[in-house]
Image (cartoon, rainbow, N blue to C red):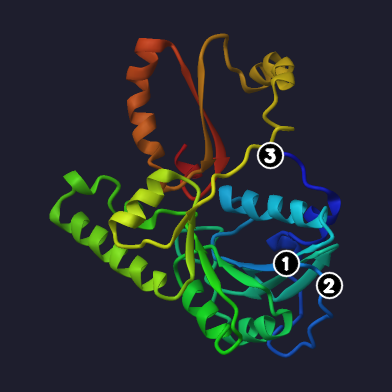
Amino acid sequence: MTALPESVAERVYLSDTALQDSTVDLSRLALPPIVRPAARLSVLDITEFYGDTTGGIRTYLRQKSVYVEARPDLRQVVVLPSPRDHVAQSDGVRSYRLQGPKVPKQAPYRFMLATRSNRRIMCHERPDVVEIGSPGFVPWIAKLATRGLDIPLVAFWHSNFPRVLAPFPERADAFRRALWDLGWRYARQIDQQVAMSIVCSRFVADDLRAAGIDRVAHIPLGVDLHHFHPSRRARREVVRARLGLPDGPVAGFVGRFAQEKEIDLAIRAWPEVYRRTGAMLALIGAGPMQAQF
């Protein structure tokens, strides 16, 4: 991932370790003045899907902050769970970290439970829109926190969570099929709380519409052209040598080492892939399954 400008990486997205000694209590603290009060558009991002070693959602939020910083008519507020309460900001971007307990067996994720602090933040910041980035407690906390404020909520489907419960429902057993149905029932409950659901793939959009969720916006994710650029091929041999990879085809898994990613399936299948193609498999990332590798 491209390194973030120091203002964003060091001031806004502080690590859990850096927050361990924070003594702030955002349920009582006088909140700081709004950054960029004359901004044309402001968004508040709130999610439980964030941690020091998490993947796509972490990248999404941080790159959005880079975009906002560079455009004076925009303003972003980010609300994330953390070991301790904390508030930090850079030019145009403010981060509220709210203390929450760890999600069992899902390090480094934490629950978002701070209803009072979220209400205070919403009343103070008054964003034009709230973007919900996880399906657990956050949709209901955001709905409660914005009650009476006339602030629309949108849900970003970073995870197609019913398919996490049953990846292939058409051939699932009765238990998995019941989980699939329950997942979509819950998704429809979330849909009733928001003005729109945002997806980044047509596959997820089709799943939502098939489940009766029709207010869907398909917005594909972009590509970091500085990082993914043909000029970086010059580093190929250096990287391969550092990782001990021989010449020949290499396939890479780049992401979070978690059960729902089905990395174990790729590993079990790889001897046959290697036999047919000679391709090596490189696993790049971190997560709760890392010790198994």
* Percent of width and height locating residue 107: 53, 58
Q: Which tag, 1 or 3, sits closer to the chain's start?
A: 3
In the picture shown, does residue 28 fall above or below 177?
below
Q: Depth check: 174 or 63 in front? A: 63
In the picture shown, does residue 122 fall above or below 45?
below
Q: Judge left or right: residue 107 versus residue 184.
A: right
Give the CA distance from mark 2 to mark 3: 32 Å
Give the CA distance from mark 1 to mark 3: 27 Å
* Percent of width and height locating residue 52: 65, 54
**Which residue corresponds to the image point at 57% horizontal and 84% vertical from the top-left?**
145
Secondary structure under the numbered disc 1 in the rendered image: strand
Callout in the foreground (1, 3): 1
Q: Which tag, 2 or 3, sits closer to the chain's start?
A: 3
Hey, what amino acid is under mark 3?
Answer: Met
In contact (CB < 8 Å): disc 1 and disc 3: no
User: Is residue 77 visible in this depiction of the protein?
Assistant: no
Q: Mark 3 points at which residue?
A: 1
Callout in the foreground (2, 3): 2
Residue density around tag 1, few if under 14, some if 14–19, many if 20 or more, within 10 Å: some
Hey, what amino acid is under mark 1?
Answer: Leu
Q: Name the residue under label 2.
A: 38
Q: Depth check: 197 or 178 in front? A: 197
Secondary structure under the numbered disc 2 in the rendered image: loop
In the picture shown, does residue 202 fall above or below 102?
above
Q: Depth check: 163 or 106 in front? A: 163
* Percent of width and height locating residue 109: 54, 61
Q: Quadrant of the N terminus?
A: top right
